[in-house]
Amino acid sequence: MHLPPTFSYAGYRFPPDVIGYAVWLYYRFPLSLRVVEELLAARGIDLTYETVRRWSVRFGLGIARRIRSTALARGDKWHLDEVVVTLNRKKHWLWRAVDQHGTVLDVLVQSRRDRCAAKRLMRKLPKKHGRAPRVLITDKLKSYAAANSDLGLNVEHRQHKGLNNRADNSHQPTRVHEKVMRRFKSVRHLQRFTPVHDQVGNLFMHCRYHTNAQQKREVRTQAFEAWERVTCVSMLGRLAA
């Protein structure tokens, strides 16, 4: 599959492997910018948390696009769910779609939880993935059924709270990061952070689900190699090893 155009690390004081490692730490683990700064300082890399923030903004979305473009075909059973997020003392809704394997397909921040909001997400998903799902699973929010009817999607739609645990659980990593950040600052901040966070999570999600140590190492090595391909740099820790 053809990769999107790569990005240039030219003009930065630090080498590309340091930049890639800092961005990986920030999006892969529930760490604040200041904690990432301290972890890098422990390796003898002296920079400020503001530098890490700028790197995450500059390279994050590009990395997410490259991860998405090289990923295998997603599942045909899509789970949709929404969760409330408070931004500047106002309620917003983080809409999320995942497949039956737990892979996040897309996220969308909206101010409403109605028919139009559900339609916007359900219209966006088939365009991005090039096809409609075989089965659509949601909770009992009536907006999903109304949006499905408006769009005329010829898919099986199952509405049941218990069937949608896959989507419910996919919100947890974002919630953990939200606490570390002491809440997201704005809609723009949330919409910029979650697509990158979820795509990096997709890349490494299978590293923890293998009880066999050898199998876990193999899967983790594959994830690191994929990360190096999309960022065009070697992992800092792997170089040291």
Image (cartoon, grey):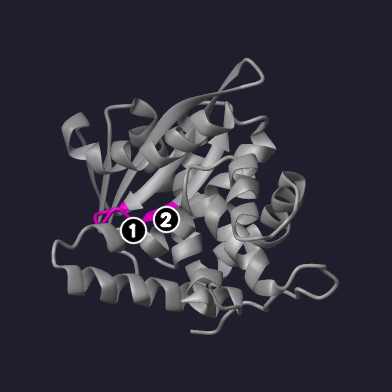
- The residue drawn where x is 56% and y is 78% is 234
* Residue at which label 1 appears: 205
Q: Is residue 153 above or below residue 86?
A: below
Tell me the CA gap for discs 1 and 2. Answer: 5 Å
Looking at this view, name the residue that lies furthest to the right: 11
- Viewer can see residue 235: yes
Looking at the image, which is closer to me, 139 or 36?
36
Residue closer to the observer: 186 or 82: 186
Label 1, secondary structure: give it: helix
Q: Secondary structure at mark 2?
A: helix
Q: Is residue 192 magenta?
A: no
Is 232 in front, or is 31? 31
Left or right, residue 21 beside residue 75:
right
Q: Which residue is mark 2?
A: 201
Residues packed near mark 1 inside 10 Å, few (<14), some (14 to 19) or many (20 plus):
some
Q: Position of residue 219 (x, y in %)?
A: 29, 72
Q: What residue is drawn where x is 66% and y is 60%? A: 44
Specify the amino acid type for callout 1. Met
The amino acid pointed to by label 2 is Gly
Question: Residue at the spot x=34%, y=27% of the render?
Answer: 142
What span is in magenta? 99-105
In the picture, measured across the screen, residue 29 lies left or right of residue 222, that is right
